[in-house]
Amino acid sequence: MAIDYPAARASLVRILSKEIRDERALDAIGRVPRERFVPAPLRQHAYENRPLPIGNGQTISQPLMVALMIQALRLRGDEKLLEVGTGSGYQAALLSHLAREVVTVERVPELAESARRRLADLGYANVRVHVAGEALGWPSDAPYDAISVTAGAPAIPRSLVDQLAMNGRLVVPVGGRRVQQLVRASKSDRGVTVERLGECRFVPLIAADGGWPERADSHNGARATG
C-alpha cells in the first residue's frame, strides 16, 4: 500500500503541537519531506516520533527533539545560523525555512556529501554543508546569531560561544556520553546566561576542542543527529 506522506506529515505535526508552541517550527516540519532524509527501506517509518538509523552509526533525530531544539533557538527569520552535526540534513532543511542562512558542518565525509546532494536536489539554496575541520564549528564564517549542536558535549564549548554574535543563542546537549541536559546559552554584554531545558540523549560530540575524544564505541547509542 502506498503511503500518504503529506497526511502522515500532518499527523506528526498534530502530535508535536501538544508540546511545541513555536508555530514557525511546526509549519517547517509540515513542509519538509522527512521521508527523503531516511534510507529508502525505512521510509514507511519516517513520520513516527522516533529516531531512525541513517548509516555510519548515526541516526536522524526524534522529531520531538528536533522541534524542541528549534524552539529553543528562538529564531525570527533573519539569523545566520550554524549547525554542528549535519547528519542526514533534515534539521538543516527545517532551519532553512526559519533562518536567513544556514551553515552546517559534519565530521563524517560520506554523510556530509549525501546531505549536500539531498539538500541541493530539494532546493534548499540557503544551506551550505561543510566537512568539519580541526576547529569545532566553522569559525571562518563567524559570528552566528544562533548555533545548534546535535551531539552531546561534556561542557558548553567555549569555542562555540566565541563564534556567537552578541545576543546570540547556543543550544547544545551537555553531560555524559549517553545522557545529557539540553541547555541554551545566551550571550550578551553582561556575559553568558545558561538555561537547562530538560534531559536528552545524543551521540557524543567528537572534537579535540570542547568535545569528547574519539574511541571505538563513540558512535554507539546513537539517538539524535540531524
Image: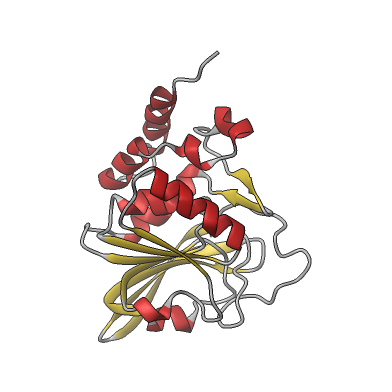
Which quarter of the picture shows residue 29?
top left
Q: Position of residue 201 (x, y in %)?
A: 60, 56
Which residue corresponds to the image point at 46% horizontal and 54% vertical from the top-left?
116
- Does residue 35 appear left or right of residue 14 in this picture? right
Q: Is residue 32 visible?
A: yes
Residue nearest the viewer, comparing 226 with 26: 226
The image's colour scheme reads secondary structure
Q: Quadrant of the N terminus?
A: top right
**Residue 93 location (% of width, % of height):** 39, 49
- Furthest residue toward top: 1
Q: Is residue 190 above or below residue 185?
A: below
Residue at 52% from the left image edge and 81% from the top image edge? 135
Horizontal side of residue 19 vs 221, given as left or right: left
Expressed as whole percent of the image width and height from the top left, the position of residue 126 reads 30, 57
Residue 134: x and y in percent read 56, 80
Q: Is residue 92 above or below residue 10?
A: below
| Closer to us: 11 or 77 | 77
Res 68 seen here: no
How many numbered marks are there?
A: 0
Identify whether 187 is placed above or below 58: below
In this view, the residue farthest toward the bottom is 190
